[in-house]
C-alpha cells in the first residue's frame, strides 16, 4: 500500500473553504487541473455513493465515487473507479480542521493506493504535488494566502 | 460536559515540536503555568499509565495520568486524576500533524470535562488560554526564535491576522464578481426556448408557459431541440405534489423526443443531428429545448417517428417490464387489465393478447368497451348489477384470474384481491383513483396472493436495461403487435388543457404536446 499525505495552511475559516470544496461536483470551480465534471445519473453531489465523472485539462477522464461526507468533521472521502493513472484500491480523504488562533484552516489531503512496482515515487509525486498541492495552491490563491 | 479545542501552527518541523511535547514529565521545562513536575511510582516518562504530579505556578496541585502515547501519530491523551482546580472527568488529547507545504507543524490540543454549575465559562477560558494557548506561545518562542526571530513578531500580534482577514474578504468579493462574469459569458452559448413551469403545487392552472434557455452541454451531456412531449398520469402527480419529484419552481414531464443540437465531451453513443428520445426522471420534459445527461437518452430508429416515441416510450417501456419482467406473462394465463383503453392499459391489452393470454378488460362505458375489444380484450367488464369480482368468477368458472394489472388504486384494490385465482399475482402499478392505504398482509393468504408494487425507476436505472426494454418495445411497434394510438394533440403552451383532459378521463390512447 502506497500512502500520500499533503497538508497546508489556508488563510480563511474552515466554513468558507468547506463551502468551496464540499460540492463533489465543483472541482472545475476551484481545482486548476479539472476542466469539466458531472454527477452521474443526476444524483445530488452530496449523496454518499454518487459518482462524479470529470475530465482533466490534459484530456484524461476519471470517475470517482463519494464514500463519506461529513459536514461535522469537514471531511470528504472518495475512491477512484476509473482513471488513466494506473492505481488500484485508491481511497483519498480531504479534510479541514480549524486553526483556532487566527482565522486559518489546516487542510489535509491524503490517499492510499496500490500500483505496479517501481511506479510508487512517480505517482506519489504526481498525486501529492500535482493534484493535492495544486489544489491547495489554488485555494491559497483564492483566499489570498 | 464542556469541550475546549485550541489549535495553532508552529513554524518548526514536526519532529522538533514532538520532542518537546512527548516528554510527559517535561512540561515544567517549557509551560509557564507549570512550576514543578515529577513522576509517581518510579514510572518512566513515556510509560502509558504513568502519573505526573504538577505544582502549578499558582500554587495548586494537579495529578494527571498518561492514557495513550503514539510516536507514529504524534499524539497523546491524558486524564486528570486529582486536582485543586475543579475540573472533573477531564480527558485531553494532544496531536501534531505535519504541514507538508512549508515544513511546519499543526498542533491540536483539546479536552472535555465537567465543572461546578455556573463556572463553565470561567474554567473553559482558564483551560483554553491559561493552559493551551499559553503552551502554544511558549513552544513557539522556543522553537521559532531558533529558526528566525523576525517571524514571531508577526505571529504574536493578533491585529495582523485580522488585517489580513479584511484584505482577503475584499479579494473574495472581487473574485466572486469575476465568477459571475464567467457564468454570464457561458450563458451566451445558451439556446432559448419555451417551457411549462409550475411555481407551486396545485391544479392544472398552476402550469404557465415561460421563456427558458438550455446551456451548452457539459461533460456527458446532450442538448436536444424537442419536437414532441408525452403527457402521463405521473405528470399530474408531480404537478399536484402527490409525488415530490419537482420542488417548485420546476418543469414537469418525463418523456420527449427530438433532435440533438450538440453534445458535450465524452458522449459517444449519440451524435449531433441524431433523433433521440427519453422516458425517465429527472423531470423537466415540458420544454422545447433541454440539456440533460446523455446516458438517459436513446437513439431512435428511422421507422419510429418522434410522435410515436413521445406517445409510447414511457407507457411502452412500462408495458414491457410489467409483462416481461414483473410478471412474465405465459400463454394460456388469464389476465385482468384495468383501464384497457388508457395509455399503458391499451398497450398491455394488445401485448397480452399477442402473448396468448386470455385478456379481460375492466372499463367504464360501452364506447370504451368497444375500443378495448379492438385492443385485443377477449372480454370487457362494465360496472353492473354484480360486483367486478363476481363477474370475474362467473367468467372463469369460479376460479379467478392469474394476474391483474391495476393502476386504478384505491377504488379497485379490494376487488382485485377478491378476483385473483389461488397463487395469483396482483401487480399494483399506480393509484389514479387515490392512495391504496394500509392493508393487512395476512388477508393475502386467503388465496396465496403475490403482490408487486413495481417502480419504473428500478427497471430503467441503467442504460443497459433501457436499451434492452426499448429494443423489444420498438420491435413490437414495427411488427404491429402494438398500435400506438395518439388520442389528442395539444400545443406545448396548452399543457394545462392536456392535464384537464387526462384528469377528466375523457382521453383514449396517448396525449402528446407538440413543441415545434
Image (cartoon, coloured by chain):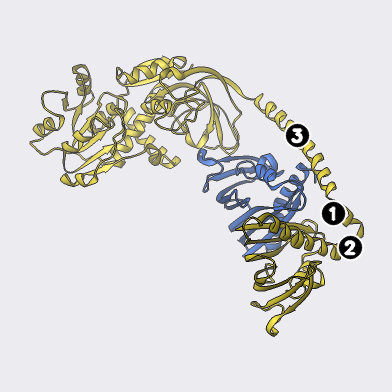
Chain colours: A blue, B yellow
State whether residue B351 is above or below residue B17: above
In terms of depth relative to the viewer, which is nearer, B469 or B458? Answer: B458
Q: Nearer the viewer, residue A62 or B96?
A: B96
Residue ID for mark 2: B145
Circle 2 chain = B
- Name the residue beneath numbered marker 3: B173
Residue B32 is tagged as none
At mark 2, the secondary structure is helix
Query: For the residue labelled by badge 1, is the local secondary structure a helix, a strand or a loop?
Result: helix
Q: Position of residue A84 (x, y in %)?
A: 62, 51
Q: Is residue A144 above or below residue B506?
A: below
Classify B370 as above or below A35. Answer: above
User: Mark 3, residues whose alpha carbon is within 10 Å: few (<14), some, or many (≥20)?
Assistant: few
**In the image, residue B13 above or below residue B431:** below
**Picture residue at 32% right of the left edge, 23% below the top:** B484
Looking at the image, which residue is at 85% across and 54% down? B156
Q: Chain of mark 3?
A: B
Which residue does the numbered mark 1 point to in the structure image?
Answer: B155
In the image, residue B216 lies at what x, y percent?
Answer: 61, 29
How far from the left and from the top, in percent, is residue B79?
Answer: 64, 69
**Quarter the N terminus of chain B occupies:** bottom right
Residue under the point 70% across and 56% down: B122
- State the residue in front, B306 or B292: B292
**Measured Cα–Cα span from mark 1 to mark 3:** 26 Å
The answer to whether residue A125 is seen in the rendering is no
Sequence order check, earlier mark of 2 and 1 = 2
Question: In the image, residue B424 lies at what x, y percent?
Answer: 19, 42
Q: Is residue B493 visible?
A: yes
| Farthest-out residue, bottom | B42
Letter of the chain that mark 1 sits on in the rendering: B
The mark nearer the N terminus, 1 or 3, is 1
Amino acid at each position: 500500500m502506497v500512502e500520500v499525505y499533503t497538508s497546508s495552511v489556508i488563510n480563511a475559516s474552515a466554513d468558507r473553504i468547506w463551502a468551496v470544496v464540499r460540492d463533489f461536483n465543483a472541482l472545475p470551480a476551484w481545482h486548476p487541473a479539472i476542466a469539466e465534471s458531472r454527477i452521474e445519473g443526476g444524483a445530488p453531489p452530496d449523496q454518499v455513493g454518487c459518482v462524479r465523472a470529470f475530465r482533466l485539462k490534459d484530456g484524461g477522464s476519471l470517475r470517482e465515487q463519494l464514500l463519506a461526507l461529513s459536514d461535522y468533521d469537514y471531511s470528504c472521502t472518495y475512491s477512484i473507479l476509473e482513471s488513466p493513472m494506473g492505481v488500484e484500491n485508491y481511497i483519498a480523504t480531504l479534510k479541514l480542521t480549524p486553526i483556532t488562533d487566527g482565522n486559518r484552516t489546516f487542510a489535509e489531503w491524503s490517499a492510499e493506493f496500490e500500483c505496479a512496482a517501481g511506479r510508487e515515487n512517480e505517482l506519489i509525486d504526481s498525486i501529492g504535488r500535482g493534484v493535492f498541492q495544486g489544489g491547495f495552491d489554488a485555494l491559497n490563491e483564492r483566499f489570498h494566502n | 460536559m464542556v469541550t475546549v479545542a485550541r489549535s495553532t501552527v508552529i513554524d518548526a518541523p514536526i519532529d522538533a515540536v514532538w520532542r518537546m511535547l512527548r516528554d510527559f514529565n517535561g512540561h515544567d521545562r517549557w509551560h509557564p503555568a507549570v512550576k514543578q513536575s515529577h513522576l509517581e511510582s518510579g514510572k518512566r516518562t513515556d510509560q502509558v499509565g504513568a502519573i505526573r504530579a504538577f505544582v502549578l505556578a499558582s500554587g495548586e496541585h494537579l495529578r494527571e495520568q498518561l492514557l495513550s502515547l503514539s510516536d507514529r501519530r504524534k499524539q497523546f491523551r491524558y486524564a486528570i486524576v486529582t486536582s485543586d482546580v475543579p475540573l472533573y472527568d477531564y480527558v485531553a488529547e494532544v496531536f501534531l500533524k505535519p504541514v507538508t507545504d512549508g515544513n511546519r507543524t499543526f498542533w491540536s490540543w483539546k479536552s472535555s470535562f465537567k465543572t461546578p454549575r455556573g463556572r463553565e465559562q470561567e474554567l473553559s477560558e482558564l483551560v483554553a488560554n491559561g493552559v493551551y494557548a499559553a503552551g502554544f506561545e511558549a513552544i513557539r518562542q522556543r522553537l521559532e526564535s531558533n529558526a528566525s526571530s523576525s517571524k514571531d513578531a508577526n505571529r504574536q500580534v493578533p491585529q495582523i491576522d485580522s488585517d489580513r482577514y479584511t484584505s482577503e474578504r475584499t479579494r473574495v468579493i472581487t473574485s466572486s464578481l469575476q465568477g459571475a462574469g464567467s457564468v454570464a459569458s457561458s450563458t451566451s452559448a445558451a439556446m432559448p426556448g419555451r417551457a411549462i413551469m409550475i411555481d407551486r403545487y396545485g391544479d392544472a392552472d398552476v402550469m404557465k408557459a415561460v421563456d427558458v434557455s438550455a446551456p451548452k452541454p457539459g461533460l456527458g451531456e446532450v442538448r436536444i431541440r424537442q419536437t414532441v412531449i408525452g403527457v402521463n398520469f405521473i405528470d399530474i402527480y408531480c404537478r399536484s405534489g402527490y409525488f415530490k419529484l419537482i420542488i417548485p419552481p420546476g418543469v414537469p414531464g418525463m418523456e420527449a423526443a427530438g433532435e440533438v443540437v450538440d453534445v458535450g465531451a465524452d458522449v459517444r453513443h449519440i451524435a449531433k443531428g441524431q433523433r433521440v428520445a427519453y422516458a425517465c426522471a429527472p423531470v423537466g420534459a415540458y420544454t422545447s429545448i433541454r440539456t440533460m445527461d446523455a446516458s438517459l437518452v436513446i437513439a431512435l430508429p428511422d421507422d419510429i417517428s418522434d410522435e410515436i416515441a413521445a406517445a409510447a416510450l414511457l407507457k411502452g417501456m412500462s408495458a414491457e417490464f410489467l409483462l416481461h419482467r414483473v410478471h412474465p406473462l405465459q400463454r394460456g394465463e388469464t389476465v385482468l387489465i384495468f383501464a384497457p383503453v388508457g395509455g399503458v392499459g391499451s398497450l398491455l391489452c394488445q401485448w397480452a393478447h399477442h402473448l396468448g393470454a386470455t385478456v379481460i378488460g375492466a372499463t367504464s362505458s360501452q364506447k370504451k368497451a368497444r375500443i378495448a375489444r379492438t385492443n385485443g380484450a377477449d372480454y370487457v367488464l362494465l360496472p353492473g348489477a354484480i360486483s367486478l369480482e363476481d363477474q370475474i368468477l362467473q367468467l372463469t368458472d369460479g376460479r379467478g384470474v392469474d394476474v391483474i394489472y391495476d393502476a386504478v388504486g384505491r377504488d379497485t384494490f379490494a376487488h382485485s384481491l377478491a378476483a385473483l385465482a389461488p397463487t395469483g399475482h396482483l401487480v399494483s402499478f399506480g393509484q389514479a383513483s387515490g392512495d391504496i392505504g394500509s392493508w393487512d398482509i395476512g388477508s393475502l393468504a386467503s388465496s396465496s396472493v403475490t403482490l408487486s408494487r413495481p417502480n419504473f425507476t428500478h427497471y430503467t436505472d441503467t442504460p443497459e436495461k433501457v436499451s434492452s426494454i426499448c429494443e423489444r418495445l420498438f420491435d413490437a411497434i414495427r411488427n404491429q403487435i402494438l398500435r400506438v394510438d395518439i388520442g389528442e394533440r395539444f400545443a406545448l403552451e396548452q399543457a394545462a388543457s392536456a392535464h384537464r383532459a387526462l384528469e377528466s378521463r375523457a382521453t383514449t390512447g396517448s396525449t402528446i404536446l407538440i413543441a415545434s
